[in-house]
Image (spheres, rainbow, N blue to C red):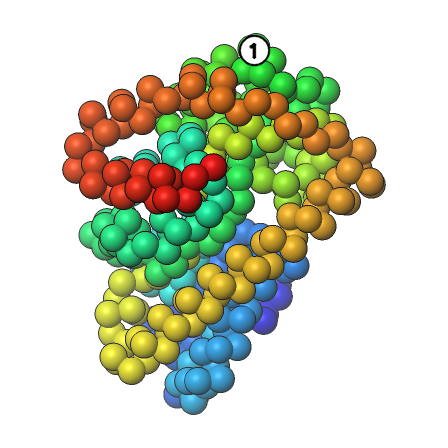
Amino acid sequence: MKSFPKAVFPALCALLLTAVLSGCSGGDKRTVRIGHNQAADHPTNLALLAFEEYIEGALGDKYDVEVYPSELLGSQTDMVQLTQTGAIDFCVASNSILETFSRNYTLFNLPYLFVSSEAYHQAMDDPDITGPIFESTRQAGFQAVTWIDAGTRNFYTVDTPIESPADLKGLKIRVQQSPTNVAMMSLLGGSATPMGFGEVYTALQSKVIDGAENNELALTSNGHGDVCKFYSYDMHQMIPDILIGNCDFLDNLSPEDRGVFEEGFRLGNSVEREEWGKAVEAAKERAANQQGVTFLYPEVQPFQDICTPMHQDLIAANPDLTPIYEGIQQWNAACGS
């Protein structure tokens, strides 16, 4: 895995574009570049390193895979654009960014879409559900190749315990830059403050915002638990991150090579899910014992009841999503809470 300081980012981008235009690097091997925004020890990076090892083990005479963590290739938005143009081949994108390319991704942003982690995993593994969504961005030059578990999103605050929706009233809460997330926060009574993830720590520290919403790893990997002392399991969203690939690259793979890449995608997903579970437990222990974070378990139903109208509104505005939504509800019924 190549590692570069952020100071060299402009030069690196120029180098990447030159290498891509030349078609290959390192002799006859095709360099496959993958970017993401997580740290080197994050489950996402560990999964992509497993993917790298698998591809190079099976097709090492053809491909040299390079994984760039920690926004070394720019922000997620930058990396999606680089993947569109083929300057890089793959990147990990948040669902909120992909929502701006295809309204199909809006479905995954709905609060309380899944009743349990089991239902979430089963639905995301169901190609009848993910297929129409994953392929909906091909006209933009990229498509999803697998999903990445990002756990459950919950509210955490500097100094206000969130034990009911009423506790959110008047609080400035950072949300992802998505209309769906802004609408959710408005319904729950808080003041939605969309901003990039990289800005959140400073905004919390300077009290520009009162809290945020994310999974447990944000407390430790990103230091938010140094500032926020209450983490409330309202369980409002289970939103996957998505590994996307450039369509031209994928379509030009031979059937044999494409099969190897598909197996690599499945391996990466499996490794990430296993590492995610371990990382969450480690993050909770560190947050509680070293950062002094208190974990709260409010009754979920009042939050869910407030957000339920968003489901009807989305389906009414996007009736073509009805079969996918109903498929998710079938998994919810099968798996229970």
Residue in front for this viewpoint, 285 or 54: 285
Residue 310 image position (x, y, % from top left) = 33, 23
The residue positioned farthest toward the left in the image shown: 320
SS for dot 1:
helix
Horizontal and vertical percent position of residue 288: 78, 38
User: Residue 129: x percent and y percent?
Assistant: 28, 49
Q: Quadrant of residue 294?
A: top right
- Left or right: where 307 falls relative to 132: right
Residue tagged 1: 166
Q: Amino acid at mark 1?
A: Ala
In the image, is 9 to the left or to the right of 328?
A: right
Side of 46 relative to 189 (left or right) = right
x and y, in percent, of residue 189 in the image: 50, 13
For the point 61% across and 23% down, which residue is it? Answer: 298
Q: Residue at x 53, y 59 (%)?
A: 272
Q: How many numbered discs?
A: 1
The relative height of residue 89 versus residue 101 in the rendered view (above or below) is below
